[in-house]
Structure formats: C-alpha cells, structure tokens
Image (cartoon, rainbow, N blue to C red):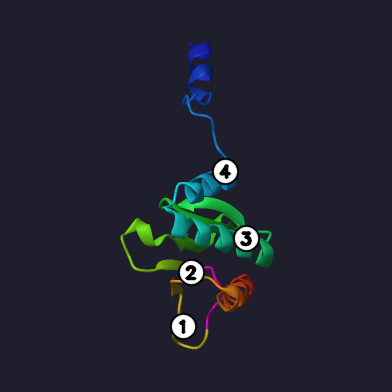
Amino acid sequence: MAEDAVKSKRPRASGKKKVDGLTEVLDTIAAMPEGDREMAKRFHAIVELAAPGLKPRLWYGMPAWAKDGKVLCFFQAASKFGARYATFGFEEIAALDDGAMWPTAFALVELGDAEEARIEALITKAMG
C-alpha cells in the first residue's frame, strides 16, 4: 500500500517533451505566413533589445513576453483572425497608466524604424 501511495505522487510522464517558451515562440513565428512572420521576428527582436529580462512564452497561441510569470505584452498576427493588421498589446501588469484612460493595444500594418522606436519606448515604459 505504501508503495502505491509513493507511486501516485510521482509526476506522470506525458509522452511529450516539455519545450521552453523561447522555442515555442520561435516555432509559432516560423509557422506564420510570410508578412506576419517577418513582422513578428522584428517585434521579437525589439522586445529582446528593450526588455531582455522578459520571458517568451505562448499566450492563447500567440507570441507573448512575461514578467514575473505574467504576460506583459503580446503579438497577434493579422492572419490569426483574418484581420487587415497585426496587433501588439499589453496586459494589466504593463505600467502604461496615463490618467484615467490609455491605449493597451496597437494596430500594426508596417514595422519601420519609426514604429520600432515607438514600440521600444512603450515596452520600456511598460516595464516600469
């Protein structure tokens, strides 16, 4: 009986190897259609540069970056819902407060140098 109790407390093998968040994010980006993929790669690079302490992970199937285990920001490909633009957004832990109302998501149709600078500034501010 005691041996059965010990066996039941052991973690079960799921048959799947646990994949780290970075690998999941990069695999998800690689599977995106070309336009989304290029934008998502650049977005990922911006996040790594602006906030290297954030941990990449998937969040509702989208690339996301977490702070202290909670999603701070995410990238939603246009193809995810057949939208005409990609979206990048922030979750509640982002320190973007600006009075009684502020934006938490942004439409993105192109990602040039100006947009890159703005995203980097927003992520830096969101980190607090």
Percent position (x, y) of residue 50? 66, 67
Q: Which quarter shows the C terminus?
A: bottom right
- The residue nearer to you, when weighing 117 against 56, is 117
Q: Amino acid at mark 2?
A: Glu
Mark 2 element type = loop
Q: Which of the 4 image quarters holds residue 34?
A: bottom left
Q: Amino acid at mark 3?
A: Ala
Disc marking residue 23: 4
Looking at marks 1 and 2 on the same chain, the residue that comes earlier in the sequence is marked by 2
Residue at the farthest bottom position: 99
Name the residue tied to disc 1.
102
Residue under the image location 62 percent in, 70 percent down: 127
Disc marking residue 15: none
Looking at marks 1 and 3 on the same chain, the residue that comes earlier in the sequence is marked by 3
Looking at marks 2 and 3 on the same chain, the residue that comes earlier in the sequence is marked by 3
Disc marking residue 92: 2
Mark 1 element type = loop
Mark 4 element type = helix
How many other residues sit within 10 Å of disc 1, few (<14), some (14-19) or many (≥20)?
few
Percent position (x, y) of residue 115? 55, 76
Residue at the farthest left position: 82
The CA span between labels 2 and 3 is 22 Å
Looking at marks 3 and 4 on the same chain, the residue that comes earlier in the sequence is marked by 4
Q: Which residues are magenta?
A: 89-97
Disc marking residue 45: 3
Q: Nearer the viewer, mark 1 or mark 2?
A: 1
Q: Amino acid at mark 4?
A: Thr
